[in-house]
Image (cartoon, helix red, strand yellow):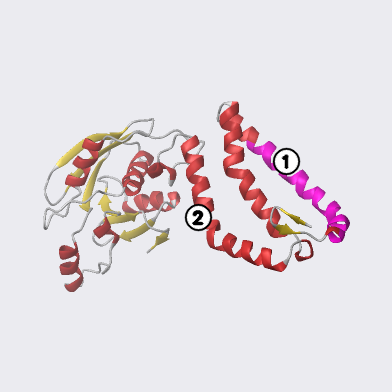
């Protein structure tokens, strides 16, 4: 019998149907849990239904299909489906998470670092560039997650490469990382910037002079910031950054700063 393009063995199916009662009950339980979660975040009934259908049911169906024995589905169909599943599962989950964050009105840059059950911290930073001696206190994002493009340009400027005066659009994830660390120490601290964006030319010079900089540093992509906060112990700053696990954390006690970036979590 061919159903939805899948070749089923009816005899094996009739014998094995009872095995999937637990899966069906599990599906109902999972959906029930997510309904409760949506109610917790005070979503409308429509949003709750959308959250379930768009995010959880497709993943559950993929998992159920993965558990169906080979005796019930012909090998050709299983091989084709599982090939695409293994190749696309990560992309599928990323799309689902993007849908989740859109349902909760969280912007992409905030999605990486903001738990769904926490209110967004104020998007405000006070920076001091130790090389150019410039200061900037600015609100770059409101509580609704909307970014001020003019404020972001100002952040790009103060975080520019001081050697060439080149700027780049700083990655919002690393900006939010910095902001969250600041809030862990009460907020409104003057953050002293050692390095934000680093031009390829300047990075190459530092690399040649053996300043222990990476040849392909994330600073060149606007995804890293080196900084310290006066009157805050460097170890405490490192501990705060590590506790968040938002990205890379480097500890440089001899030169007196902490490195953070929006890459994969790692530490040195």
Give the dominant element type of the magenta stretch: helix, strand or loop: helix
Magenta segment includes 16: yes
Image mark count = 2
Q: Relative to 5, is 214 on the left or the right?
A: left
Which region shows up in magenta? 11-34
User: In front: 190, or 160?
Assistant: 160
Q: CA distance from mark 1 to mark 2?
A: 26 Å
User: In front: 115, or 172?
Assistant: 172
How crowded is the residue under tag 1: few (<14 C-alpha within 10 Å), some, or many (20+)? few
- Residue 106, position as x, y percentages in the image: 43, 37
Q: Quadrant of the N terminus?
A: bottom right
Tell me which residue sits at (29%, 55%) in the image: 224
Q: Which residue is mark 2?
A: 91
Q: Secondary structure at mark 1?
A: helix
Magenta segment includes 165: no
| Tag shown at residue 29 | 1
Tell me which residue sits at (35%, 40%) in the image: 185
- Which quarter of the figure has residue 72? bottom right
């Amino acid at each position: 019998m061919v159903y939805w393009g899948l070749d089923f063995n009816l005899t094996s199916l009739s014998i094995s149907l009872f095995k999937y009662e637990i899966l069906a009950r599990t599906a109902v339980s999972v959906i029930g849990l997510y309904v409760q979660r949506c109610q917790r975040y005070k979503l409308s009934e429509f949003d709750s239904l959308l959250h379930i259908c768009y995010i959880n049911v497709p993943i559950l169906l993929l998992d159920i299909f993965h558990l169906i024995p080979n005796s019930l589905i012909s090998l050709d169909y299983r091989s084709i489906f599982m090939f695409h599943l293994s190749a696309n599962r990560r992309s599928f989950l990323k799309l689902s998470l993007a849908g989740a964050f859109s349902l909760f009105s969280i912007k992409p840059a905030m999605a990486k670092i903001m738990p769904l059950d926490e209110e967004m911290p104020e998007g405000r930073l006070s920076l001091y560039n130790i090389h150019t001696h410039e200061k900037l206190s600015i609100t770059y994002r409101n509580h609704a997650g909307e970014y001020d493009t003019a404020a972001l340009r100002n952040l790009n400027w103060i975080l520019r490469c001081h050697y060439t005066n080149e700027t780049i659009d700083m990655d919002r994830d690393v900006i939010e990382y910095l902001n969250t660390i600041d809030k862990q120490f009460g907020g409104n601290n003057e953050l002293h910037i050692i390095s934000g964006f680093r031009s390829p030319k300047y990075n190459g010079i530092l690399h040649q002079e053996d300043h222990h900089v990476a040849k392909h540093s994330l600073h060149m992509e606007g995804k890293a910031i080196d900084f310290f906060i006066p009157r805050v112990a460097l170890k405490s700053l490192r501990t705060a950054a590590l506790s968040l696990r938002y990205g890379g954390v480097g500890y440089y006690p001899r030169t007196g700063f902490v490195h953070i970036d929006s890459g994969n979590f790692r530490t040195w």
